[in-house]
Image: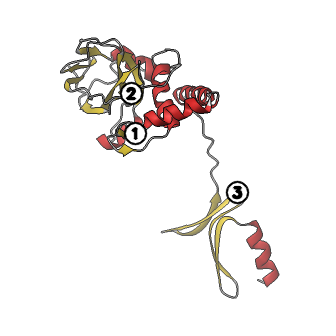
Amino acid sequence: MTSRGLLLLFKILIMARVIYSSQVDEIKGSIGGLTFNANVAGKGIRLKPRNKYTSSVVQNEYKSMYTSICNAWNALDTNVKEEWAIEAVAIDTFNAWGEQKIWSGLNFFVSAQMGRLLIDDDLMGYVGALESIQAPTITVYTVNSNEISLTLLSSVSDTDYYYMFYLSPPNTLGFKKQRTQLRFVYAAALNGAVDVDLTEAFESAFGLSWPIATESNVFSLCLGIRVYNRNNGSWSQYVLSYKSFVAV
């Protein structure tokens, strides 16, 4: 191939690599709609897949919430934003997984206001006051033909504290991978109560009728719980539990 031909080829490459000496010996990657690859059967060319990403209803709801919160932040006076920033560093802050993080005012604002929207409350019209909230303790987590339920060691006797419940879809993934699939399913100010049935919440969130199987250990569900104070926008870290389905 001439030098002019090589130059033309480089101009049309899209995420492709050309390996050449005095001629083109090998092409790896993609050119236009074609993908060049090699496997045990030899070298080949195939059409490049065009996967269209489609957001789920839940993802769209979260995006809508996030957009509303960001719009509210942008509408705040600069002095109010600074007050949120000052409060964000007032105490050591940790993310949902227990990792210590340095928050900005926007971080705290989004976190605090998201909880309000999840419980169908109005956005806070004042600066929140961070507090350290202890994560709950799960004593019993049940996943069987009759129910998805749990029992806590205790709950806060204050209706400002909401217990936020998350479940993964039914799958066979390991525990650490399941936690990335957690979906918010239910919120309640338990006010001292410790027994919670999540069966209907699961059915509503995932569009499935319970039970979905009749055999033991076909799948498992990851459960996550966080406590949220609607009055000041503070959250506890997650407490997680993992249980295989058992038919009864």
Q: Residue at x 33, y 16 (%)?
A: 199
Q: Secondary structure at mark 3?
A: loop
Q: Secondary structure at mark 2?
A: strand
User: Disc 1 marks which residue?
Assistant: 180
Say whether residue 121 is left or right of residue 91.
right
- Distance between the alpha carbons at the discs numbered 3 and 2: 49 Å
Q: Quadrant of the C terminus?
A: top left
Q: Amino acid at mark 3?
A: Gly
> x, y (%) of residue 213?
32, 24
Front disc: 1 or 3: 1
> x, y (%) of residue 41?
51, 68
- Distance between the alpha carbons at the discs numbered 1 and 2: 22 Å
Q: How is the image coloured?
A: secondary structure
> x, y (%) of residue 110?
51, 31
Q: Quadrant of the N terminus?
A: bottom right
Judge the density around disc 2: few (<14), some (14-19), many (≥20) Cα neighbours within 10 Å. many
Q: Outermost residue, bottom direction?
A: 22
Q: Amino acid at mark 1?
A: Thr
User: Disc 3 marks which residue?
Assistant: 33
In the image, 174 versus 73, the foreground residue is 73
